[in-house]
Amino acid sequence: MRERYGRLLATLAILGISVPGSSQYLMGIANSNYGGTQSIYRHPSEAADSRYRFYLNLASVDLYASTNQVRWVAPFSVVGYVTGQIPTQYRSERGKSLGRTGYLKEQLNGRDKRLSVGGEIRGPSALITLNDRFGIALSTRARTAVTYRNTSEATARLMLYGTQIVELQRVLNENQHGMANINGYGELAATFGAVIFDNDDQFLKAGVTVKREVGFYNAHVRVDDGTHQIVRDPNLSGFQALRIRKFDGVYGYTSELAFQRAGFSPGWLFGKQSAGGGWGFDLGMTYEYRPNFRRYTYREKGEIRRDPTKNKYLYRISASLVDLGGIRFKNPEMVNLYQVSVTNKLITNTTFQGIKSPDAINERIVNTLMLPLMEKTTSYRSGLPTALNVSADYQVKNNLYVGLLWTQSLVPSNAVALITPSMVAVVPRWESRWAEVSMPVALQDNYSMPTIGLALRAGPVFAGTDHLGGLANIGNPRGANFYAGATIPLFRRGPKNPTDCYFPPQEGGYWKRFGRKR
C-alpha cells in the first residue's frame, strides 16, 4: 500500500508540478553524409545534393532519459533494472519505487531540478534526389516525453520519495515553483531542398520542411507560487498526507478520447477528430568549401556535372531553425484548462483509491482541488521544441571527418512546450558507403552533463548511443540514451567513364555560369 501511495503521489506531482518534454539528437548519425532522412531532421538543406538516389527509413527509434536530481549508483545498469536482468541478491528490490532502493544518489545543492524521459519513433520516411539541384523528402514520426524542469528541490524530493520519508515530514516548504508538460503528438512532414549555387569551390544549398502536427495527449501544470507540507493522515494511523497550503498556477489536460481517436484518417490529421493540431517549420542552409572541385567535375552528354557519389568539401557549415510552430488544443470535447488559486487542500492515502485511468486521475485532482467547472476553458497552445542547430564538419583525410554539433533551445523556461535541451558535441567519425563508426564527445543537458557516445552503421542498419556511460553503467551516470534503425539505401551513380573528370573553370564566375545546364 505504501509503495502504491508513493507512486500515485509521484504521478500527481508529475501531473501537477513540473514537466516540459524534449527531443534528442542522434549525434553519431545526424552529421553523416550517409544519414539520409535522419540528417534532414537536423538540417532540412540535407535533402539536396545527397549521396542517395533514394533512401527509405523503414523504422527507427530513439529512447532517452536525463536528470540533474540523482545519479545511478546501483551495481548494475539501468537497462538491467528495467529488463529484470539483475543479480539474484538484488531481486528483492524489484517493485519498489526507485527512491527507496538505494540505487539513486541525490544531488542536493538547493538548485532547481529537471528530468526528461521520452522517446521518438520515426516511421516510414523517404528521401528522393530529383536531379543535381533538387531533392525532396516525406517523413512520419511520433514524439512523446514526460519531464520536469525549473522545479524546486523540495518538490522534486517529494516526487522521488513520496510522503513516507521521515526527514521530509512536518517541514513547511514555501515559495515552490515548477512547470509541467506531458506531451505526445504525431507528425507528417514534407521537405524540399535546393542547391542555391555551385560556384566551383563555393557551394550553398538550402532547405525547408513543412510539418503537420497532431496531438495524441497533453497534460500540463504551471506552479507560480506553492506551499506544501507532509502531515499525518487524519484517517489512517501510521500514514502521511500532503497538505497543499497554497497553489497558484494553471492546470490543463486532454481526455483519453484524444489518444483513442488517433489515426491517419483525414478527419484526424486535418479535421475535428483530434484534440488539437497545428503546423511546424524547419529552415536551414549549408555552405561547403570545395578547393578540389576539379577532381569531381566531368562532362556527360554535353552537361557539366559534379560526381554525386563523392563528398567534395574540405569543410562544411550548416545552420537551421527547427520546430518553429506549435499545436493548438481546442476540441471542447477533449480539452480542459483551469486557472488555479487554492489553499488548504489535503491529499490523503485514499484520495486516489480505485483509480484506473488518466481521466479518473484528472477528475479526482479537479475535485480534490475544488476547481470550479464554470471557469474551465477549452483551448490552449503547446509549443514545439524550437531550437537553433549549428553544425560544422572537416574532412581530415579520405573517409575521416571531425564534426562539431551545437543545439541551443529557444523555448522560454515557463512555456507549455516540448524542449530539446541545449548541448555541444565534437564527433570524430570514419564513414564509407556501407559502414560507419563515430564517437560523439558532448556536453548535454544544457551543457551540464559530459558524455561519450558510440554509433555504428553497417549496410542498411544503424545503432548507437549518445550516452555510453548510461548504458554500460560507467561513472554513476545521470542519464541514458539509445537509438537504432533499419533503412533501404539506393546510392547515386557516378560518371560512366571514371577517367572522364576535370572540366576547366569558365571565366566570369558564378553569374556568367548560372544558366548553364547541370
Image: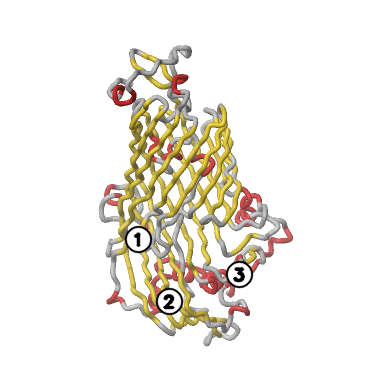
| Residue 207 picture quarter | top left
Please state if 155 lies on the left or on the right of 299 as rendered.
Answer: right
**Quarter of the figure with the N terminus:** bottom right
What's under tag 1, amino acid-wise? Answer: Leu
Neighbourhood count class around disc 3 (C-alpha, 10 Å): few under 14, some 14–19, many 20 upward = some
Label 3: which secondary element: loop
Using the image as rendered, state which of residue 327 and residue 202 is in the foreground: 202
Mark yes or no: residue 123 visible.
no
**Farthest residue in the bottom direction?**
234
Mark yes or no: residue 391 visible.
yes
Neighbourhood count class around disc 1 (C-alpha, 10 Å): few under 14, some 14–19, many 20 upward = some
Residue 26 placement (x, y as % from top left): 51, 44
| Residue 493 picture quarter | top left
**Label ID, residue 257:** 1
Q: Which residue is mark 2?
A: 225
Residue at image point 52% right, 44% down: 27
